[in-house]
Image (cartoon, rainbow, N blue to C red):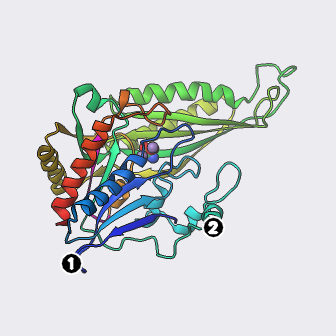
Amino acid sequence: IGTLWVRRPGTAPAAEPVLVGSHLDTQPTGGRFDGVYGVLGGLEVIERLNDLDAATRHPIDLVVWTNEEGSRFQYSMMGSAVWSQKMELEGALSLTDVDGVTVADELDRLGWAGSRPAAPSGAAAAFELHIEQGPILEDEGIEIGVVTGVQGLRWYTIELGGFPAHAGPTPMIGRRDPARAIAGLVDDVYAAVEAKGEWARATFAQFRSHPVSPNTIPETLTCTLDLRHPDGEVLEAMETQMRAIVTARCEATGVTGEVTLGNDSPPVHFDEGLVATIEQAAAAVGVSNRRMISGAGHDACYVARHHPTAMIFVPCQDGLSHNEAESITSEQAAAGASVLLGAVRAVAS
Ligand code: HGY
Ligand code: MN
Ligand code: MN
């Protein structure tokens, strides 16, 4: 599936690797640190060990996961989902972008379709270094986030079916206009989700109507919806409520509605032992740290299904990400990489 594995050998041939790394793919208007920082941090750990000529018992594998964002090919954490057997390889290879280009087409064009099976092959531990992509660490003036888990996320496509007619002569009464349904539906879902408390998240995006014309009532109107919550049961309740809202708004406006669940990543709890290892590494580096969960999804979610896994966060300016203004300081970058080095050495040696 095009995931890149770079190994620094260990001294004990049979020892399973310690995984580091993240992703290099980004958002159309993404920043320079989401994913990339974790890959370069992992590479920096390997380079630093080489500089120190420091051997480790376990090999260290730098992993660069394919299509973590799910932005162009819409299944987030796709490469790690295939590797963890959550997603069929064929299903991933056949995903298409808006121009109908498939993942397989692009891997072939780039010569990146690998020969090794995309499947777990053993690891002693896995760490992912990443920017927080939220405001907590910066607001509290804390230098390192010791990530204990990741909230659940579900992606949907909502397709509303109307009846195309002329924008001019067609009376307002009796129109079957999906734009009318979506207007109320979006408001209702946001209100229902906000009522679930401060950690609940709903994001509508990618509104597309057909036909593409300003003076024809749309025949179809589709959009994406991203729902998140740390508690799987609350997330399930959010989905149930959302589906009821879609049904009610469609009935009220005479349009049809179809909600399709895409990728569904349940809440993840990381390895308590590795969480403690990261805390000890942060203390050894002398940086302040706090435990927290991740609002964003990461490849570590799928790695954690097979191996002990945990994450390290650094703050980012204004908690901003998936925005070209995304930024961290070199001190923050160094602090995160130093903690990663300490945690990796603690396990790999
Ligand atoms: O959607 C996410 O949380 C991640 O950026 N894939
Ligand atoms: Mn990321
Ligand atoms: Mn991202």
Name the chief secondary structure element in magenta: strand
> In x, y percent, where is residue 263?
49, 52
Residue 308 in sight from this viewpoint: no
> In x, y percent, where is residue 45?
28, 56
> Which one is earlier in the sequence, the residue at label 2 or at label 1?
1
Which sits in the foreground, 67 or 208?
Answer: 67
Closer to the eye: label 2 or 1? 1
Residue 52 in sight from this viewpoint: yes
Which sits in the foreground, 115 or 103?
Answer: 115
Above or below, comparing residue 58 to residue 205 in the picture:
below
The magenta stretch is 306-314
The structure residue drawn at horizontal position 52% and vertical position 51%, both measured from the top left corner, is 262
Q: Which residue is mark 1?
A: 12
Gap in angstroms between the C-alphas marked 2 and 1: 36 Å
Quarter in which the C terminus is drawn: bottom left
> In x, y percent, where is residue 3?
47, 63
Q: Is residue 218 left or right of residue 288?
A: right
Packing grade of label 2 (10 A; few <14, some 14-19, many >=20) is few
For residue 162, what is the image quadrant?
top right
Which sits in the foreground, 263 or 299?
Answer: 299
Under mark 1, the amino acid is Ala
**Is the residue marked 2 within 8 Å of ligand 1, measured from its CB?**
no
Q: Is residue 73 left or right of residue 292?
A: right
Above or below, comparing residue 128 to residue 336 in the picture:
below
| The residue positioned farthest toward the bottom in the image shown | 13
Under mark 2, the amino acid is Asp
Q: Which residue is mark 2?
A: 108
Element type at marker 2?
helix
The structure residue drawn at horizontal position 78% and vertical position 35%, both measured from the top left corner, is 212
Element type at marker 1?
loop
